[in-house]
Image (cartoon, rainbow, N blue to C red):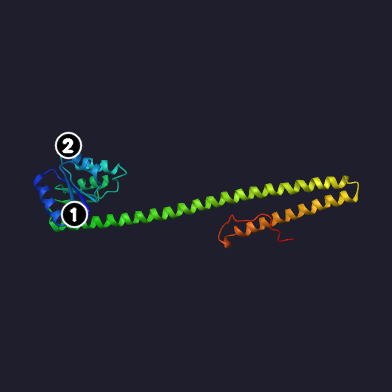
Amino acid sequence: MPQILLIEDEPLVRDSLEDVLGLAGYGLTTAEDGRAAMTALKNQIPDLVICDINMPDMDGYSLLEQLRSDPATQDLPFVFLTARSRREDQRQGMALGADDFLTKPFTVDELLAMIQVRLVRRSQTKQQVQLEKARSQVLEKEVRNQEDQVVRKADLLNKMIEEFRTPLSNVNMALNMLERAQSDEERQRYIAILRHEYTRQVGLINEVSNLQEMTSPRRGGFSPSVTMGRSKFL
């Protein structure tokens, strides 16, 4: 049931509108002025506000200005009921953010038609907001996934760099020792070390190649399940 907040300081008009809107199937909360309306809004945010302009204590303009300054009610549909017909009054209300004016006297059909239009637009706005929120959530998830992939790739590449350093260090040491070897046995031992480190180096190069293939756009993204040590070039 759509909820309407009716703000009207004249009891006879307020009671009559309450009967009409109740029979039309709307949930209704009433207030006699702007301050009473602010109290009612703390308890429940309606789907539509219908408000008189001339009221004691806080008039309709002041109330609308407060509602538009509050994020919780800044998009709340707001319609003025008024006996004022001057363009200046309507321009003032529109400048403050009023959605519509219904000039007194008005018929029941005019009132109900105006309410229907505003509630339909309210529903469409809510649906659009929900759709945009869902799209935003999808985009945020995609961004987080991309960020996670970047972090995983950076971690893996750092690990590979560390893995490259170890065989290179061993190769350098074996070459130095090979230069100083005094016998064939020593030379063979250092040559075996060089071959072993060569095998490790080729394996690491293969892993870099695998990573490049997995991160290629045509492969659909990055997968961290790279097995260290495969040597397809051997």
Q: Quadrant of the N terminus?
A: bottom left
Looking at this rendering, what residue extends furthest in the left direction? Answer: 12
Residue positioned 66% across, 54% down in the render: 228
Q: Is residue 161 left or right of residue 149?
A: right
Specify few, some or many for label 2: CA neighbours under 10 Å numbering under 14, 14-19, or 20 or more. few
Q: Earlier in the sequence, mark 1 or mark 2?
A: 1
Left or right, residue 152 beside residue 32: right
Q: Which of 110 and 15 is in front in this view?
A: 15
Q: Where is residue 136 in the image (x, y as percent from the top left)?
A: 42, 53
Q: Which mark is residue 109?
A: none
Residue drawn at the location 76% of the way across and 54% of the way down: 198
Residue that badge 1 annotates: 26
Residue 8 figure quarter: top left
- State the residue in front, 39 or 128: 39
Vertical order, 142 against 93 (above or below): below
- Whether tag 1 and tag 2 are in contact, CB under 8 A, the answer is no
Find residue 57 and name its label.
2
Element assignment for label 2: loop
Residue 207 x, y percent position in the rendering: 67, 56
Q: What residue type is labelled 2?
A: Asp
Q: Residue furthest top?
A: 57
Question: Which residue is located at x 68 percent, y 48 percent?
Answer: 161
Three-letter amino acid code at the position of disc 1: Tyr
Rendering coords of residue 118 (x, y %)? 24, 55
* Horizontal side, residue 166 vs residue 76: left or right: right
Residue at figure coordinates x 19%, y 52% from the top left: 27
